[in-house]
Image: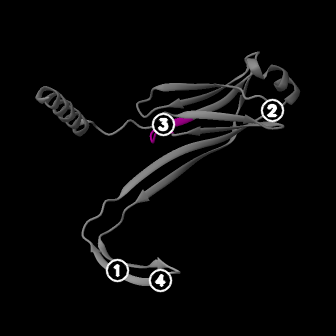
Amino acid sequence: MPRILCAVLSTVCLLTILGACAGPSDPPVMRASAAAEARQIQIRVDDLPPAREITDVVLIDPEGKETKARDRQIVTREVGDGGASGPGVSVGATGGSSSGVKPFISLGYIFSSRRDERRSRYLTAVIPLADPEAYDSGFRDSRIEVRYRDAEGGEGLLTLAAPPP
């Protein structure tokens, strides 16, 4: 029994140390989705890294002809919680209809706080379809490319299949 307890405690200690030494998690991987409508394709690219620049979004048909996206827009979302330290007031009630309702007021002071902010960016774009009938018949051989440049100057490519009509 002491050997098992020692092995369990050793494993717990090792996992605790590894958890404490772990750095911040990697940012989410950029991903894209597309949907075809009557005369256009709607594209959305989520989780853009802060320094990444989208250089082009194009539809490439089976013959290799490129149609560039228009109406490109990058949206930044900020989500935060926490706040400054200071006094706090809370008003509430306990009880129910059979036991009676008891209102209360709570006063307190927050001595420290932590502010967590998360920022994410996404891109939306529209690719017009010049010939919807040709797209309908050849969409399986078409693809969408999202071309980008990172802060270091390296270029990258995110490819996805053309959506069905």
- Magenta part of the chain: 48-54
Residues 66 and 15: in front is 15
Q: Amino acid at mark 4?
A: Val
User: What color scheme is it?
Assistant: one colour
Label 2 belongs to which residue? 129
Amino acid at pointer 3: Arg
> Which kind of residue does numbered mark 1 sit on?
Ser
Q: Which mark is on residue 101?
A: 4
64 relative to 148 in the view: left or right: right
Question: Which residue is denoted by mark 3 in the rendering?
Answer: 52
Q: Could you tell me residue 4's position as x and y percent?
A: 17, 27
Amino acid type, label 2: Leu
Mark 1 highlights which residue? Answer: 106
Sequence-wise first label, 4 or 1: 4
Q: Which of disc 2 and disc 1 is earlier in sequence? A: 1
- Tell me how far mark 1 sits from mark 3, CA to CA: 47 Å
| Residue sitting at x 46%, y 78% | 95
Measure the C-alpha gap from mark 4 to mark 1. Answer: 16 Å
